Each structure stands twice: as C-alpha cells, then as structure tokens.
Amino acid sequence: MYRAGVADLPLHGGKAPKWLFGRMVKLADAIVSIIIDEYGAKELIQRLSNPFFFQALSCVLGFDWHSSGTTTVTCSALKLAMRPGEHGIAVAGGKGSTSRKTPLEIPQIGELFDLSEAKVEDLKYASRMSAKVDNTAIQAGYQLYHHCIFITEEGDWSVIQQGMNPEIRKARRYHWLKGTFKTFVEEPHTAIVGEVSHKKVLDMTSKYSEECRKISTDLVNDNPQHLKTILSDKPLNQETLLKWVPQTNVSPPLHLNLLKSVNWKALMKAYQAQPKNYEELLSFRGIGPSTVKALAMISGLIYGKPPSWKDPVKYSFAFGGKDGVPYPVNKKSMDEATAFLKKVVEEAKTETKEKTQALRRLQQYAPLTE
C-alpha cells in the first residue's frame, strides 16, 4: 500500500536557531552545486517551481516539514547558499520588509549578470505582477508576507511566495515559473500549496473568469463615471446587489458599499490609459482587491458574466493522500522529486554524518512502499 509523508502549513512564530540554519545553508550549498553542475541553473529553478521537490528539499535541509517556515527559512538558506558568480543564479526578496527590497535588488542582479535593461524591466514586472495576482486577482484571505524571485544569468526566473491567513492561522504558498503560462492573469501558477480549500474564493485567474475579465476591462475603458451611475441607482447599502453574491472569507466584507470600495482615482487613471487587456488593467497601481471584486460583481450580476468562485489551490500535503482534498497527491511527481534529491544528496560533497541524516529526513517525507 502506498504511503506518503504529509505536511500542512500552520503559522509558526520565531526564527530558526543559528546552529540549524548554518547547517541548512551548508547543505543547501552542496545540493545546489551538484544540481547546477550536472543539470544547469535553469533546471534548478524549474525544480524549485515543483512543490514536491521544494517540500522534499526543505525536509532534506532539516527544517520543520509541517511549518510555514518551510517556505521562508528554506528560501533564506538558498539565498545565502547561492553564489551568483559561481552558480549563475541570484535571489532577490525574502520575508517581510526584505520582500519590499526586491525592486532594488533586481537591478543589482541585472548588473551582476550583465542583463539588458529590457530584461531587468521584465524581471521587475514579473516580480510585481506575480505578487499583484496572488494578493488581488485571487482573494482567499491570504496576504503575502514572503516573496522570492530566483534569477539565472540568462534572465530566466522562478517565484516562490507565501501568504498568511491570521484568522485560521494557516499559510499558502504560490509557485511561478517563466515560460509556463501565456499571461499573468490566466492560470499562471505551477502550483498553489495550502492545507485548506475554501468554499468561496474569487479567482480572476481561472479560465472560467475569462469573460468576466473582458467585461471588467470594458467597464473601465467605457468610463468609470458610468459605473458610478450604475451603483448610485441602487440603495446605499447595496442590498439588491449583494444578496445575490456568494459569501466569501475575504476582507473587506461583502456588505460594504460597492460605491465606496472602488478606487475611483485609480480607475480614472486606467481609463485615461485605455488598458488593452485585464493584465494591463491589473498592473495599474491602486487597482486593489476591493476594486477588482467590485468590477467582477458588476460583471456577473448586471452583465451575466460571473467570475469563478472556486478555490484554485492545487496541492495539499496534509490531505491529498487521504481524501483528495483539495486535490489528490501526484504520486509520480512526489516519487520523482524524492528519487532525484536522494541521488543529489548521495553525490554531494559533505560529511557522511550530515549526508546520512539528510537521507533519513527525506525517507520520513516520502516513505518507500513495502
């Protein structure tokens, strides 16, 4: 009978102890060096965009495999372990205030790798839009507090970021990889990892939200003043609209007045620029969750083009192997990630004791079948 290790992402405070973190960085250096030497830098960022590989890597490095720190501490260890001049990969961003330094770190990385100005701008855009999508286009109640972008010397990239829901004390991790999606606003993730699948989540990135995205863009290009007229014709408490809207767990609450929740200044700026598509609309500063939600609600309730309210979370290490919620564990991907890391650890230039302990931790993550 197949057995698999499980992991959820509860929010845990505190920091990794120095003695542990130092060993994590040392082992991460050995693992990263082997992968890049054998398979190249691009292969490493592709692996990091695989949630099973990333989870297995965190276990090998030795951090709590069931904690939200799986993401933050592992990425921090990788950032310190990667030497751009030797490995051909650099990492920008991090946890909390460090994540907000990403726009400043990317040009420095671009200069280090001698990337063109256009590539640097593309990287800054990828960083900003991946965060904007997961904070605004998907509204499941998880506010981003961690953002890392892994950049190769060719300009390829992978993003790993995490949001927290303090009410239920859970975290959710988002994986992105350049070249695996057509636009930033239509199912762009390689994975969304979380323990909880919520019943009602506004997902403007779903393929089922395509018409809603088009209507939302048309509403702005037609002139936001017309939107004000539509909303002002309703009672101030908006009962006639809101009673038809699915209840969600996001903030602000749906009972707030739509007229007041929209950022009209941002919409007017967008109107003046006439965005060509929804991605361009979403990229405008000031187009936040409330405005996105209001446009989606109007699209669905007045124009008959509703958004998707299905939670897009794709993987759950806590429940996938049991009842398939929110999705069944991909056994093949899990086995491949484990086998790959086992091979890498065995070849890594590190002490025998550390290597043995790492392999034991990997075995705990995905026990072998009998």
Image (cartoon, rainbow, N blue to C red):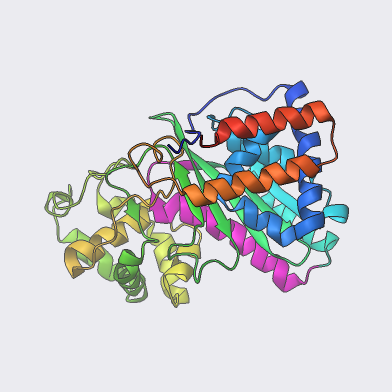
Residue at 59% x, 34% y: name it: 70
Residue at 67% x, 35% y: name it: 60
Image quadrant in which the N terminus is located: top left
| SS assignment for the magenta stretch, majority | helix
Q: Position of residue 31 (x, y in %)?
A: 76, 44
Q: Is residue 193 magenta?
A: no
8 to 288, vertically: above or below: above
Q: Can you see residue 262?
A: no
Q: Quadrant of residue 215?
A: bottom left
Along the viewing direction, whichever of 228 and 354 lies nearer the viewer: 354
Is residue 199 found left or right of 145 in the rendered image? left
Along the viewing direction, whichever of 237 and 81 lies nearer the viewer: 81
Is residue 72 found left or right of 88 in the rendered image? left
Is residue 207 found left or right of 181 in the rendered image? left
Q: Position of residue 259 (x, y in %)?
A: 27, 55
Residue at 61% x, 40% y: name it: 56
Q: Which residues fall within the magenta stretch?
A: 115-143
Q: Position of residue 121 (x, y in %)?
A: 68, 67
Q: Position of residue 226 (x, y in %)?
A: 26, 70
Q: Is residue 142 magenta?
A: yes
209 to 118, vertically: above or below: above
Q: Can you see residue 352?
A: yes
Q: How many marks?
A: 0
Given the current orientation, which residue lies at the most extreme front position?
A: 370
189 to 4, vertically: above or below: below
Residue at 54% x, 29% y: name it: 67
